[in-house]
Amino acid sequence: MPRVKRGKSHLKKRKNLLKRVKGFLLGRKSLIKLAKTADTKAGAYAYRDRRNKKREMRRLWQIKINAAVRGLGTTYSQFMGSLGKKNIALDRKVLSELAANQPQIFEKIVEQAK
């Protein structure tokens, strides 16, 4: 079996790994063995948290809507239920933006939903 020289590809692989872990603490940024595990973990956390971010944003929208609606004399669940019954198709993201930035328009929506 012929000998395989893999200097270029090996160095490229290591260089790319070290580029990805640049800025990590201690040996995790410079030692190959530690950098590999750090890179793997970082990728796993990034994948997981791209999904968690969607959850967190929805929770934040719900909190904003609830705070705005309670000032108008109802609760979040009652408001969302009445929106469904009246066939007002606005999602939580839009409703939270309206509640925060344009309270007059949001108040009209709440009145329509009642």
Image (cartoon, rainbow, N blue to C red):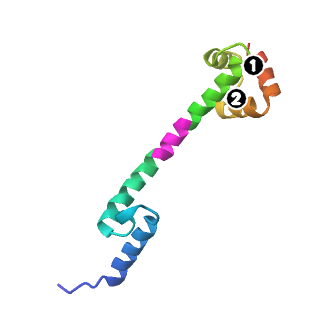
Q: Which mark is residue 57?
A: none
Residue at image position (63%, 32%) is 61
Q: Nearer the viewer, mark 2 or mark 1?
A: 1
* Residue 52 within the segment the image draws in magenta: yes
> In the rendering, at what x and y percent does residue 70 appear?
68, 17
Identify which amino acid the numbered label 1 is placed on: Val
Is residue 33 magenta-colored? no
Q: Where in the figure is residue 113, as x and y percent of width and height? A: 73, 16
Q: Residues within 10 Å of mark 2 (few under 14, many from 20)?
A: few
Which residues are the magenta region?
49-56
With respect to residue 66, does 17 lie above or below?
below
**Residue at left 64%, top 14%?**
78
Q: Residue furthest front?
A: 26
Q: Earlier in the sequence, mark 2 or mark 1?
A: 2
Which mark, residue 90? 2
Q: Magenta region's main secondary structure?
A: helix
In the rendered image, the residue lying farthest to the left is 1
Secondary structure at badge 1 equals helix
Placement of the C terminus among the 4 image quadrants: top right
Q: Amino acid at mark 2?
A: Leu
Secondary structure at numbered mark 2:
loop
Q: Is residue 101 left or right of residue 62?
A: right
**Between marks 2 and 1, how big is the CA–CA gap?**
12 Å
The x, y position of residue 11, in whole percent, is 36, 79
Q: Which residue is mark 1?
A: 110
Q: Is residue 51 above or below residue 58?
A: below
